[in-house]
Amino acid sequence: MPNATLSILKNYLTTAVRALLKQKLHTGLNLLGLSLGLTAALLIALWVRFELSYDRFHPNVDNSYRLVVSDPQSGKRSANFSGPVAEFLRQQSELKHLLAMHHFGSALQRDSERFFARDYFVVDESLLSLFAITALHGDLQQTFDEPNQVALSQRQANRLFGAEQVVGETLLWGNTPLTVSAVFADLPDNTHLPLQGFIGFETWWPRNGHVLESQDNQNLNLYLQTPSGTDAKQLAELLTEKLYDFAGPQEPSFTLELQPITDIHLHSNTPFPLKSGGSAQAVYTAIGLSLCVLLIATFNFVNLSTARAGLRAKEVGVRKALGANRRQLISQFLFEALLLTATAALLACVWAELALPHFNRLMNSALDIHYLGDVGPLLLTMVLAVGLLAGAYPALYLSSFNSARVLSGDLTSGHGALRTRRLLIGLQSAISIGLIVASFGVIAQLLLLQSQPLGYSKEQRLVIRDLPNGLLRSADNFGRVLHTTELVSHWTLMDKDPTRQFNMRRSANSNGEQIDGIIMKMGYDDLAAALGLELIAGRDFSAEFRGDRYDPDAKTVGIILNRQAALAAGFAEPQDALHQVWQLGELTGTIVGVVEDYKAGPDLDDTIPLFFTHSHSALGSVDAVVQLKEAISPQQLSELRRTLQRPLPAGFDLDIRFLDAIYQAQFDQQRRQFVLLLSMTAVALTLTVIGLFGLAAFSCERRSKEIAMRKVLGSSYASIVALINKEFVALVALGSLLAWPLAHWGLNRWLEHFLHRVELAWWWFPAATVVVLAITVATVSALALNTARQRPALTLRDE
């Protein structure tokens, strides 16, 4: 039996190779189309697989969640909580573990090198239960059991000390020595947690514990682990009820959610993420694009196979006459389709390897292809799916030929295959038109986001990020050094530059009225001037008014509101807010100015009420915003960097960026989506051209004698070209009727995710149709014209 099966497969292979080699143009076009489609699908599948793999390697991942709070009225969500809330939740018996995480946000020093500790966190020992932290050297538990201990990642140990085994080495945190208790393995890229080092709350609390004592300071990320079998939705409802009782009736409405940690990367939708996340929308878009490309490649195969069915009709008739049944013929034609698809897959692997570096740059990823890993089964699945899908209809159609009719000379293929080809050409056109319309919409939305009036100026401004908080005590000296360069017009300090949101929500008391949920930010002298904010009442922070500055003894400070904060406080006009006194806990603030709202963060939200306090910040770092007099050269920037090192601690690593570049970087994800969409649209159009070329070539070949007779009877080249084009143009036009409503619906769904969105332009739809029509007419006309130019005598001489 095995020998018989092997013999059948050998016969199938021989027949398939002969058939494919006999129709070289048909085989070449199918190979090209399928390999292009498989290349695009393989690259996108690699990226999608990576995006879906985030945080799946942690222990007990099915029972681990991040706590999220949402406002049912506004729909806004946050993953930031206050210290009192964390302590209350820690006491709940329904939770197995509760992890509180806080950004370390301070500078550290090793010998003479001083650096800002980015991606360092303050955590409790539940970190080791929720996340896969593997110790390479030392004892991770010691970080929590003993004071003044720090654990470093493998990468940080090598960067700071040039070795991994650094347990017992010391880093300085101000005047406090921190001993390295452990070195842990670097977390892989597919995690939302950018952990480079951590200390315990026991170490952090003596210096900064006051930050977590207030309900207004919501700076903690909370993670929890539940016992197996716990219903996450019911637990969230229970915790919401308990937190309502704890918070009291004066709090605004909220709902708690338990978000699986495996969903954080793609479904974060919260401000202030620990690490820039991905987008579920981008993943769905990429999957849709790869399916569109594969469908067009599959349609090409079906069209070309059924169009040339007449060339294999006699083969089918003879084999049936010799005893072959329909099942055997179907198996033969499916084998040919799978063989062609497998060959195309091998070619796609070569193209994927060549394209992978460019694809990684486009998607900001570090993907690689391991054929002996899970890429092999993935590729095999794609070959089987595409091969069977593409080969099914041709196999059923070819095997249905009646042997008596075929061998008697009736080679007409019937109207079924013709209708199928017309349907598939129409669908190809619809997909191509839809992708072009989508490209118009995405680029328009991207341009809208990049050109939004922000309420602040980003041109000719530098941001110096993560300067030590102690700079606030010597800011005047920092300013004098800045002005020695003669490049600076204005400068100021902020806790976070205007592109970054900040979740320090405070409650204020004004004339006995409680004002809740206003964001507090820190500013400095010339805040409005340096940022280009529009003053609508009062004045800017100024060195001439020393009372603006935070006085740690008197607990007084100057305040600047935005328009939304003035409205939230009940002031009918911005001028009414001036000189009003706000009580902010122990702090007394006097309002000196009101500025127009500005769009903050990647959402460009200008509806957030906020206020600035002068030089008062609980964070361990500040950002400087510097307005330049004119554009500067790289040499001048280097000189400015050297100058700024003077007032800073020796060896401090300066992070200087252009504000415009920071702003544009917020839209990198949208830019990547657009470039991916544009690339897939180009592939789809290329595949459409390949399919049209094959069908038009077959049509011209089949109608060559008709064209020759028309020439003899006096038809012009133009009329012949128009005759061949007529059917294809009609099918593209019909395809547009399907593409327009679907593209309109899809773009509207995509735009729903943006606070500021572009209006769909009517001309995108006919313009996309015109592009596909132009490509169709150009492809078909070239072949029709080539056929029409042949001498009629050569075409008709065998009649």
Image (spheres, rainbow, N blue to C red):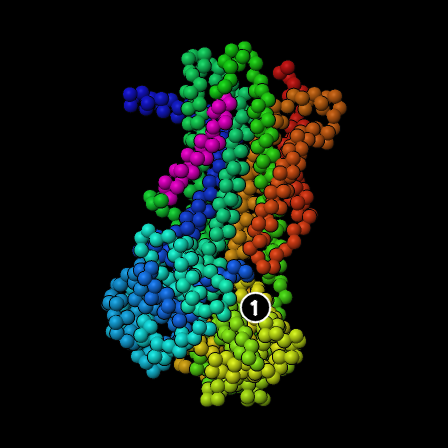
Q: Residue at x 47, y 29 (%)?
A: 391
Q: What element carries label 1?
A: loop
Q: How crowded is mark 1: few (under 14 residues within 10 Å), some or many (20 or more)?
A: some
Query: Is residue 481 left or right of 198 when viewed as pictured?
Result: right
Residue type beneath disc 1: Ile
Residue 376 falls in which quadrant of the image?
top left
Query: Secondary structure of the magenta portion, mostly?
Result: helix
Q: Residue at x 36, y 60 (%)?
A: 224
Residue 304 falls in which quadrant of the image?
top right
Would residue 376 be counted in the magenta stretch? yes
Would residue 601 be counted in the magenta stretch? no
Taking depth in this image into account, of 509 and 376 the one nearest to the observer is 509
Q: Look at the picture and state if 71 lies above or below 206.
A: above
Residue 96 falls in which quadrant of the image?
bottom left
Q: Position of residue 249 (x, y in %)?
A: 48, 68
**In what quadrant of the picture does the C terminus appear?**
top right
Q: Position of residue 253 (x, y in %)?
A: 50, 63
Query: Is residue 782 left or right of 62 when viewed as pictured?
Result: right
Magenta extent? 375-398
Which residue sits furthest right?
714
Q: Can residue 255 be seen in this view?
A: yes
Q: Look at the picture and state if 339 lies above or below 401.
A: below
Q: Where is residue 50 in the image (x, y as percent from the top left)?
A: 41, 51
Q: Name the residue under label 1.
A: 608
Q: Is residue 789 visible?
A: no
Q: Which residue is drawn at 58% across and 36% down?
A: 427
Q: Residue at x 46, y 62 (%)?
A: 69
